Image (cartoon, helix red, strand yellow):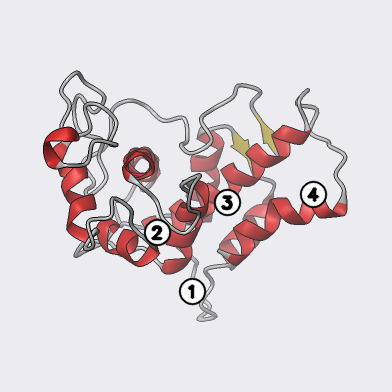
Amino acid sequence: MAYHSRSHKASAPPAPAQHGSGLPYPVPPNYYGPTSYGSSHGYSDFPSGTHPDVIRSFQMVDMDRSGFIDESELQRALSSGYQRFSLRTIRLLMFLFKNPNDSLKIGPKEFAALWSCLGQWRTIFERFDRDRSGKIDSMELRDALYSIGYAIPPSVLQVLISRYDDGSGRRVELNFDSFVECGLIVKGLTEKFKEKDPRYTGTAMLTYDTFMSMIIPFLVS
């Protein structure tokens, strides 16, 4: 797999600032603007300028008002009438955006970053869902990943796609949930590998323990 040498935030793909119209994850205008909503809603840990709709989505599922939500609450917060995230994707998001003080829950800062990240993935998905079917095929997935710097070999692409093969013999297509899962796996593992390949040679020396520690979280989420 090839990757660009430039570094990115660990949580989000490099995407344009403008986001598509696909709800529920667009990053609102002035997302990091000067107006702060967090303290007025009792959730002062949200980044300054967080849009009230993002805070409201968090509040609606934080039933015990602890300021933290677990995986089932996150699933409810991110799901809507036309889009539901699988628990597998939710657990992967929880792993990647985990709270440093509690790996089983996320707080306002993690939720705001996660919401922004999904908005960026939504933009990429819509760009390559050219027939507006709400799904992308293997070639569109390949092109989408390539557009953000990941040249996936055909063998790896096939492994990714086979994860969603229902055995019907029909062409495998990915909805947004599956696309996000694929993207996070590829990006997450690539970032982990790059930590061991500081010169970006495409090769790295890993111990067995290090290798297993890198990949297992992405396989068992």
Whether residue 6 is situated above or below residue 126 in the rendered picture? above
Give the mark nearest the N terminus, 2 or 4.
2
Give residue 52's mark. Answer: none
Location of mark 3 (residue): 185
Q: Residue at x 58, y 32 (%)?
A: 149
**Rendered location of residue 212, percent (x, y):** 76, 56
**Separation (CA) of disc 3 from disc 2:** 13 Å
Q: In this view, does 109 lie to the left or right of 212?
A: left
Asked if the residue under mark 2 is in contact with the one under mark 1, i.e. CB atoms within 8 Å, the reply is no
Q: Looking at this view, is 102 or 89 the one in front?
A: 102
**Separation (CA) of disc 1 from disc 4:** 38 Å
Give the mark nearest the N terminus, 1 or 4.
1
Whether residue 206 is situated above or below residue 10 in the rendered picture? below
**Rendered location of residue 42, percent (x, y):** 16, 42
**Rendered location of residue 156, percent (x, y):** 68, 53
Give the mark nearest the N terminus, 3 or 1.
1
Give the mark nearest the N terminus, 3 or 2.
2
Location of mark 2 (residue): 177
Location of mark 1 (residue): 170
Whether residue 199 is situated above or below residue 107 in the rendered picture? above
Q: What amino acid type is highlighted by mark number 1?
A: Arg
Q: Is residue 12 left or right of residue 156?
A: left
Q: How crowded is mark 1: few (under 14 residues within 10 Å), some or many (20 or more)?
A: few
Asked if the residue under mark 2 is in contact with the one under mark 3, i.e. CB atoms within 8 Å, the reply is no
Q: Is mark 3 on a helix, strand or loop?
A: helix
**Rendered location of residue 26, percent (x, y):** 25, 40
Q: What amino acid type is highlighted by mark number 4?
A: Thr
Q: Which residue is drawn at 79% across and 51% down?
A: 211
Q: In which quarter of the image is the C terminus?
A: bottom right
Location of mark 4 (residue): 210
